Image (tube, grey):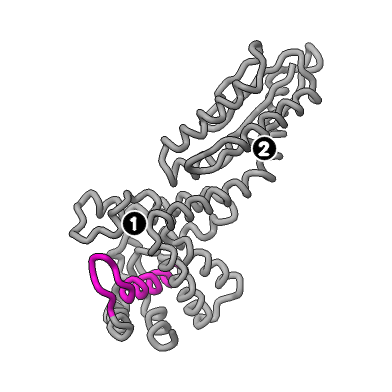
Amino acid sequence: MTLIMGDLNGLKVTNDAFGHSAGDDLLKKVTKVLKQCFRQDDIICRYGGDEFVIILTNTDSSATELIVERILALVDQQKIEKGMLSISFGWDTKNDEDDDIFQVLKRAEDNMYKKKLLESPSVRNATIQTIISTLYEKNSREEAHSKRVSDLCVQIGRNLHLSDREISNLKTAGLLHDIGKIVIQDGVLDKQGQLTEHEWIEIKRHPEIGYRILKNTIEMAELAEAVLGHHERWDGKGYPKGLSGEMIELAARIITVADAYDAMTTERPYRKAMSKAAAIQEISKNSGAQFDPQIADIFINNI
C-alpha cells in the first residue's frame, strides 16, 4: 500500500487576491483531475485546507511515480481563470505489515514538503505576476503609475545613499505598492463622483491585502511592510495602523512621497493634474504631517 500526500501550491495567495471563490475553483479542478487518474478502489481524502491524501492498494513506488506524472500532466492542461494550478506530491510505501501507517504518512508528508520547497516559490511568483497583470488589465493607469512611483523611489533611495540591495527592494516595492487594489471592484478606482462610505472602506483595505499577498511569498515577504505602510502618515493620522514617525518603515515613507507626487501630477477621471510646482508646494506644506520631513526635503531639493 502506498500513501500519497498532495499539497495545492499558492492557494492562500489566490484566496487573498481573487477571493475564496477562485480558491474553491482551484480545489474543484484538482478534485476533478485526481478522480480521473485513480482507480475505483483507491481512496482520495481531503486532509486540510490545501492538502490531499490518496491511499493506493497494491501499488509500489515505481507505479506511484507514473501515476503522479500523469496527474501533473493533466494539471498542466487545466485552464484557470484566476490564479495558477500547481500541486506538490510526496509518497511512501508500506512494504511490511509491521510498518506504522502514521509513520508512512509522515514520510509521505516529508517527501512532499521537500518537493514543495523547490516548486512552490515559482508558483507563488507566477501567481503574483498573474495578480499584477489582472490589475493592469482592470485599470491600465495603474501600470504607468506603479512604474513612475518605482522610478521616483529609486531616485529618493539614491539621494538617501541607501545600499544597492535596499534600492533594488525599494524599486520592487514601488512597483507592487498597489497590488492589493486587485480586490477593489471595477469602476471604483476611477469613479468620477464622490465615493460612498463602503467604497472608501474598500479602497482603504488595499495596503493590508497587498501585505497578505506578499507576506505569503518567501521572495517578496521583506517588501510586505513597505506595502502595508505606504498610506501611513508621519503624524499618525494615516491607515491601516495609524503609525507615526519612524515607526513607519523607511521604504513605506519613501513610497508615500513618490505615490502622492505622482497622484497629484497625473490627470484622473475625477480631477485635472496639478503642475509639478504645485505638487512640490503641497509636499512642502505637508512635510512633518503627511510626509517624513527628511524625505520630503530630499525630494523637493533633488528630484
- N-terminal of the pair, mark 2 or mark 1, is 2
- The answer to whether 233 appears left or right of 226 in the picture is left
Q: Residue furthest bottom?
A: 301
Q: Which residue was labeled with disc 1?
A: 240
Read off the magenta span: 251-274
Any magenta on residue 258? yes
Task: Say which quarter of the image contains residue 271.
Answer: bottom left
Residue at point 49% right, 64% down? 173
Task: Say which quarter of the image contains residue 103.
Answer: top right
Which kind of residue does numbered mark 2 sit on? Tyr
The picture places residue 172, in percent across and down from the top left corner, at 53, 65
The tally of labels here is 2
- How far apart, in angstroms, are the residues tagged by discs 2 and 1? 34 Å
Q: Is residue 232 above or below residue 18?
A: below
Any magenta on residue 272? yes
The picture places residue 224, in percent across and down from the top left corner, at 48, 57
Front residue of 247 and 33: 33
The picture places residue 212, in percent across and down from the top left corner, at 46, 49
Label 2 CA crowd tier, 10 Å (few <14, some 14–19, many 20+): some
Q: Is residue 31 above or below residue 221?
A: above
Label 1 CA crowd tier, 10 Å (few <14, some 14–19, many 20+): some
Give the position of the N terminus as an image quadrant. top right
Q: Which residue was labeled with disc 2?
A: 113
The local secondary structure at tag 1 comes to loop
Residue at point 55% right, 42% down? 84
Give the position of the C terminus as an image quadrant. bottom left
The local secondary structure at tag 2 comes to helix
Task: Say which quarter of the image contains residue 279.
Answer: bottom left
Which kind of residue does numbered mark 1 sit on? Pro
The picture places residue 265, in percent across and down from the top left corner, at 33, 76
Residue at point 45% right, 52% down? 134
